[in-house]
Image (spheres, helix red, strand yellow):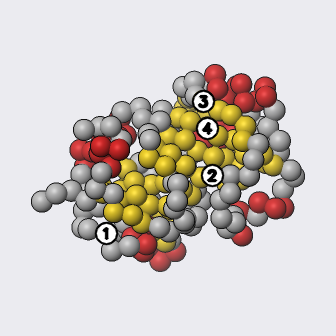
Amino acid sequence: MAHQHYKIYKPFGLISQMGSNNVREKRSKRFISELYDFVEGSMAIGRLDEKSEGLLLMTTDGKLSDTVNRSGIEKEYYAQLDGRISPEAIEKLQQGVEIGIAGKKYRTKPCAARLINEDPGFPKAHPLLRVGTHRPNSWLSVTLTEGKFRQVRKMTAAVGFPTLRLVRVRIGSVTLEGMNPSDVIDFPDMPAALHLK
């Protein structure tokens, strides 16, 4: 049977997994499975944490998921930061910064980071993010080829500009364009679009 692939605009507040065996988590958390009647065996390729939004790919093909996660494929994020980020801080991000991963120090790989001067035009932020209650903020594009736990948030905090809102806009050449939060699109061409097959 052919594998199923999906492209999702994950909204704020959902966990990037189908469900949980943890009773407390089941009661208190919301899962990606509430967006759509996914085929059995569907899994997220990589993760977006509960408070992050944007592009999430899903598949029933475990090998493909593994390949994407190991391939060093570019993932681009738009981060709304607390404060107006300085050119010096952007340069530090580009060169790599020290963050903590599982209790150990880790230096991030060099990455692409640039200031976004125009409003990226996303739907209004979830009220729980309380974006309007902070000092003036700025939008930054960060493109990574690695994906450590909460990496973008840890990186921007390391240079003094905490992330208020995080939206993944691109994985390889696959983008969020034309999608709205909670949209799920059948995406049979995903392997080809990611240039993996």
- Give the amino acid type for the residue marked by disc 4 in the picture: Val
- Give the amino acid type for the residue marked by disc 2 in the picture: Leu
| N-term mark: 3 or 1 | 1
Image: 34 above or below 139: below
**In terms of secondary structure, where does tag 3 sit?**
strand
Q: Is residue 70 found left or right of 123 in the rendered image? A: left
Q: Residue furthest front?
A: 178
**Which disc number belongs to residue 38?**
1
Residue beneath label 2, please? 166
| N-term mark: 4 or 1 | 1
**Residue found at x 71% / y 49%:** 80
Q: Quadrant of the N terminus?
A: bottom left
Residues at circles 3 and 1 in contact by the CB criterion of under 8 Å: no
Q: CA distance from mark 1 to mark 2?
A: 25 Å
Q: CA distance from mark 4 to mark 1?
A: 30 Å
- Give the amino acid type for the residue marked by disc 1 in the picture: Phe
- Give the amino acid type for the residue marked by disc 3 in the picture: Ala
Tell me where residue 139 sits by quadrant: top right
Query: Which of these two is toward me, 56 or 155?
Result: 56
Q: Quadrant of the C terminus?
A: top left
Residue beneath label 4, please? 142
How far from the left and from the top, in percent, is residue 111? 58, 28
How far from the left and from the top, in percent, is residue 167? 59, 52
| N-term mark: 1 or 2 | 1
Q: CA distance from mark 2 to mark 4?
A: 10 Å
Q: Is residue 191 found left or right of 52 in the rendered image? A: left
**Residue found at x 29% / y 37%:** 196
